[in-house]
Image (tube, rainbow, N blue to C red):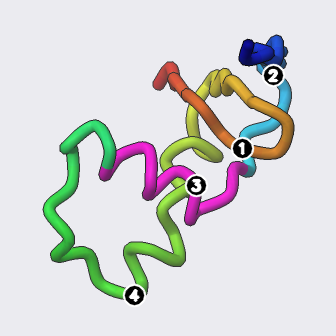
């Protein structure tokens, strides 16, 4: 018999400085990027979120599971 762990997703609408590597992975999983990004683009991947009016993120412990932003 397997035991299912209950996942607890935490939502955050205060933090806009999100980890670039985790944002990149979300975009890659969604198929929104093609892998042609430069090092500068990767380093600044979170800038649009920092400059947004609102950024809301969903976290599974320390892993970024989702994000949305409002211009």
3D distance between C-alphas at marks 3 and 4 = 15 Å
3D distance between C-alphas at marks 1 and 4 = 22 Å
Marks 3 and 1 in Cβ contact (< 8 Å): yes
- What residue is pinned by disc 3? 22
**Where in the figure is residue 53, as x and y percent of width and height?**
61, 25
> Image quadrant for the N terminus?
top right
Marks 2 and 3 in Cβ contact (< 8 Å): no
**Where in the figure is residue 58, as x and y percent of width and height?**
69, 24
Label whose residue precedes the other's in the sequence (3 or 1): 3
In the drawing, what numbered circle is on residue 39?
4
3D distance between C-alphas at marks 2 and 1 = 13 Å
Label whose residue precedes the other's in the sequence (2 or 3): 2
Whether residue 8 sits left or right of residue 25 in the image: it is: right
Q: Which residue appears farthest toward the front when viewing the image?
A: 1
Which residue: 74% across, 30% down? Answer: 59
Region rendered in magenta: 18-28
**SS under mark 4:** helix
Which residue: 16% across, 76% down? Answer: 36
- What residue is pinned by disc 2? 12
Label whose residue precedes the other's in the sequence (3 or 4): 3
| In this view, 66 is above or below 47 | above
- Quarter of image, res 34: bottom left
- Quarter of image, res 7: top right
Label whose residue precedes the other's in the sequence (4 or 2): 2
């Amino acid at each position: 018999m397997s035991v299912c762990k209950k996942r607890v997703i935490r939502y955050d609408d205060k933090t806009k400085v999100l980890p670039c590597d985790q944002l990149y992975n979300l975009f890659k999983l969604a198929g929104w990027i093609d892998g042609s990004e430069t090092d500068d683009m990767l380093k600044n991947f979170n800038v649009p979120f920092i400059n947004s009016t609102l950024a809301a993120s969903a976290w599974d412990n320390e892993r970024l599971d989702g994000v949305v932003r409002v211009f």
